[in-house]
Image: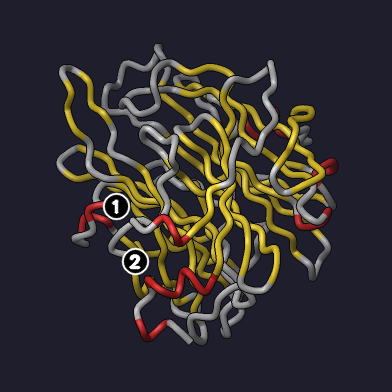
Amino acid sequence: MPELLYIEHKGRVIVPDARFKYVMAITLNPQTGYKDGIIRCITSRTKDPSLSGNVDRSELYKVSGDSLENFKIGERLNVKNEKEIINELVGEDEDFIGLEDPDIFIDEKNDLMHVYFTIPLKPNGNNLDNNKKTKVYLGHAVGKNIDSLEMTEPVLRDFTLWAKEISIAPENKKGFRYNLFESRERENGIGYSVIRLAIVDDMGKSWKFGEIAFNPKEHNIPWTAKDASPGPLFSKNFIDVGEGKLLGIINGRENYEIIGTEKRLGIFSIGLFVYDYENGKIDWVSSQPFIRDSEARNITFASAFVETGKGEGILYAHIDDSFVRAYTLKAELLKSILPAEFVL
């Protein structure tokens, strides 16, 4: 894992706040030059997130800052109609544990902000069906800016397939998008994460579930053998890997191990992939990760990328689901681990 491919910034992106011990999953707002955004704040945690069975309860809060390396937590994100929509989704035997992992998308054609987030519904203590599983929907809100958001029905909702952690692709030549998201499969009763296509005609209306684009069980890539989740896609201004293709971030997890009576989850780290957004195909995934944070015990998970100049930008990741770090990336350095066919 060559560390020279990135520069790890010192310190933490979020100024410590007495309200929250743990924060994660930052997304920043292009409308304001990335001077504000949204972050997931953990309100309670049942155990170490590196161990199976941890339950985090979360709320989304606004952040603001005067640089790309230092933000402060503001007030709770106010989303109109949130209570009404959530109440419609939660069954009597389910427990809503809070909105998670936001992503901001600006629709420049219609001058609208779309915010996507995870809506997790866990079986509660009243549920006697031991086979009932957690439901995970991809929620959505829309408005002119962060302060005028209104929640709609989820854009991806299935009782068996999870939907979270999106990569937003450009429109293809046919006029729609093959967005990517983290979904769920099961093998021998054990769940694991895959990357699935979402077929999107309108960013604000219901998306269609597509085929699996990357199943870690079908590839001999140890660093992402257990789980795979899509991260930000880089623009062609940052790095060009060919017509109809984008380079992007993929988050991968190694297989777990059993320690005593506990199942310790595998290490999550950050790698690269090449995405053919015209056809909804993942052409390549790096054989090794290229970022594991210097302080991470178990998790380095990317959530956002901001270009700071041609061929340069800042990647944001959360460490051990506890704090946010920034890293400087340079396209010329990343080219050194790309297959020759993608180096232009």
Q: Secondary structure at mark 2?
A: strand
Instruction: Point out which mark residue 20 bears.
Output: none
Q: Nearer the viewer, residue 256 or 289?
A: 289
Q: Residues within 10 Å of mark 1 (few under 14, many from 20)?
A: many
Q: Nearer the viewer, residue 337 or 164?
A: 337
Mark 1 vs mark 2, CA separation in Å = 10 Å
The residue sitting at 19% across, 37% down in the picture is 189
Judged left or right of residue 145, residue 42 is left
The residue carrying mark 2 is 285
Q: Is residue 227 left or right of residue 44?
A: left
Instruction: Look at 50% across and 61% down and name the residue there.
Output: 208
Left/right placement of residue 246 relative to residue 260 reads right
- The part of the image, by quadrant, that contains residue 236 is bottom right
Give the residue drawn at x 69%, y 45%.
69
Q: Which residue is mark 1?
A: 224
Identified by mark 1, the residue type is Thr
Crowding at mark 2 (Cα within 10 Å: few <14, some 14-19, many 20+): many
Q: Is residue 198 above or below residue 165?
A: below
Q: What residue is at 38 percent from the left and 74 percent from the top?
A: 338
Tell which of 32 and 177 is nearer to you.
Answer: 32
Q: Is residue 141 above or below residue 180?
A: above
Tag 1 near tag 2, CB within 8 Å:
yes
Which x, y percent locates residue 265?
Answer: 29, 33
By what rule are the colours in the image chosen? secondary structure
First in sequence, mark 1 or 2: give its number: 1
Q: Position of residue 45 (x, y in %)?
A: 48, 18
Residue 281: percent from left, percent from top:
39, 73
Q: Quadrant of the N terminus?
A: bottom left
